[in-house]
Image: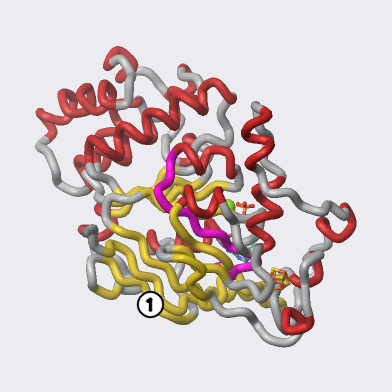
């Protein structure tokens, strides 16, 4: 049986902007197993990036704990911990300095973490570029000479240079053309297997989740509302918000259409963003709400082995 690599317990994150507070995450409990790909989905502003940033140590939780390999992650990360959890973002240019050559960018983690002496770094960068499907001939070029897909491959090579055991992938394919997206996703799947990596795959695009993740977690307004094995959640989403998300995925075939959950779309209700102060946070938008939904917060409960949902009137 695989072991827990990341254990998130009661994690809350509150941002304060002047007199305004934003509850980006509220009491999130989540475990990511070593070697799995956990997808984190939800609408814009649901707290996906915040969750990734807390794991990476870019931000600190306001409350709760995050354990990594059984140990509570310290507020100030050691260099070793920073090396073990890497980030690949939507925009590869955030990882690549436009003025640096590909060689310099990919070699940086080798130097920072003292992984290789200077005279061995060029050969290692060539190896890493090949691993991500790029010719080492690109080494002496600048990122501006590359396409979006190639830049994302280089950003991946840079993350791999640190020899991580976990990568937080925050919308890694969202800025790419659809045809390029498919190839980068294929590469990600291959790299995960090859290096036994653990992925936290953040996306608002549910159609990619099915192909890449073993489990999926759904955030709604900073709360974890459903989590489970991807196939089970797709076959029978229980939380009504997950159903709404899945019902809006574009499909290519009639068979896929038949398998998609139906959703009684009431455009105004669906677009309503109001936050419920009490009860289920989705209740203002939920056509299935019943009395308890407006009174008390539903707790995450098992709906089948390995599948939890926080819903009083599940599908
Ligand atoms: N540094 C910050 N300061 C203040 N508020 C923040 C900060 N970072 C995030 N937030 C707020 O926290 C909430 C969650 O943001 P987050 O970026 O985690 O959402 P997300 O799910 O990643 O959204 P998206 O899909 O748009 O990337 C939002 O309301 C956002 O405005
Ligand atoms: S708890 Fe109630 S309001 Fe919330 S999603 Fe379930 S049915 Fe809808
Ligand atoms: Mg985000």
Q: Quadrant of the N terminus?
A: bottom left
- Which residue shows up at 68% across the image and 36% down it? 257
Instruction: Give the percent coordinates (x, y) of residue 125.
Output: 23, 27
The stretch of residues the image draws in magenta is: 212-224
Instruction: Give the percent coordinates (x, y) of residue 166.
Output: 30, 51
> Foreground residue, 121 or 184?
184
Report if residue 19 is visible in the image: no
- Which residue shows up at 62% across the image and 61% down it? 46
- Which residue shows up at 39% across the image and 71% down it? 8
- Examine the rendered structure and indicate whether residue 67 appears above or below residue 139: below
- Examine the rendered structure and indicate whether residue 57 appears above or below residue 174: below
Q: Secondary structure at mark 1?
A: strand
Residue 153 colored in magenta in the image:
no
Quarter of the view holding residue 313: bottom right
Mark 1 Cα within 10 Å, few/some/many (few <14, many 20+)?
Answer: many
Main secondary structure of the magenta stretch = strand
Name the residue that disc number 1 marks. Answer: 65
Q: Quadrant of the C terminus?
A: bottom right
- Examine the rendered structure and indicate whether residue 169 appears above or below residue 2: above
Quarter of the view holding residue 70: bottom left
**Horizontal arrangement in the rendering, residue 118 relative to residue 176 (left or right):** left
């Amino acid at each position: 049986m695989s072991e827990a690599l990341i254990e998130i317990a009661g994690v809350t994150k509150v941002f304060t902007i002047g007199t305004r507070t934003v509850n980006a995450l509220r009491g999130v409990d989540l475990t990511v197993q070593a070697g799995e790909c956990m997808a984190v989905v939800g609408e814009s502003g649901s707290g996906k990036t915040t969750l990734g940033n807390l794991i990476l140590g870019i931000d600190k939780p306001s409350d709760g704990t995050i354990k990594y390999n059984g140990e509570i992650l310290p507020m100030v990360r050691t260099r070793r911990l920073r090396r073990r959890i890497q980030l690949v973002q939507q925009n590869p240019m955030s990882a690549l300095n436009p003025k640096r050559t590909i060689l310099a960018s990919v070699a940086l983690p080798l130097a920072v973490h003292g992984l290789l002496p200077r005279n061995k770094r060029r050969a290692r960068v060539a190896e890493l570029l090949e691993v991500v499907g790029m010719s080492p001939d690109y080494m002496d070029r600048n990122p501006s000479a590359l396409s979006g897909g190639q830049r994302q491959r280089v950003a991946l090579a840079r993350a791999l240079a640190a020899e991580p055991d976990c990568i937080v992938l925050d919308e890694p394919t969202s800025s790419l053309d659809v045809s390029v997206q498919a190839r980068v996703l294929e590469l990600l799947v291959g790299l995960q297997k090859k290096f036994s990596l653990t992925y936290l795959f953040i996306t608002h695009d549910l159609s990619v989740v099915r192909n890449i993740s073993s489990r999926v977690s759904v955030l709604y307004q900073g709360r974890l509302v459903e989590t489970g094995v991807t196939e089970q959640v797709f076959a029978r989403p229980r939380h009504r918000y997950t159903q709404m998300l899945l019902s809006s995925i574009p499909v290519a075939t009639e068979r896929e259409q038949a398998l998609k959950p139906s959703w009684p779309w009431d455009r105004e209700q669906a677009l309503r963003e109001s936050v419920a102060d009490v009860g289920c946070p989705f209740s203002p938008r939920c056509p299935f709400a019943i009395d308890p939904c407006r009174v008390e917060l539903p707790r995450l409960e098992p709906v089948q082995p390995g599948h939890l949902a926080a819903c009083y009137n599940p599908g």
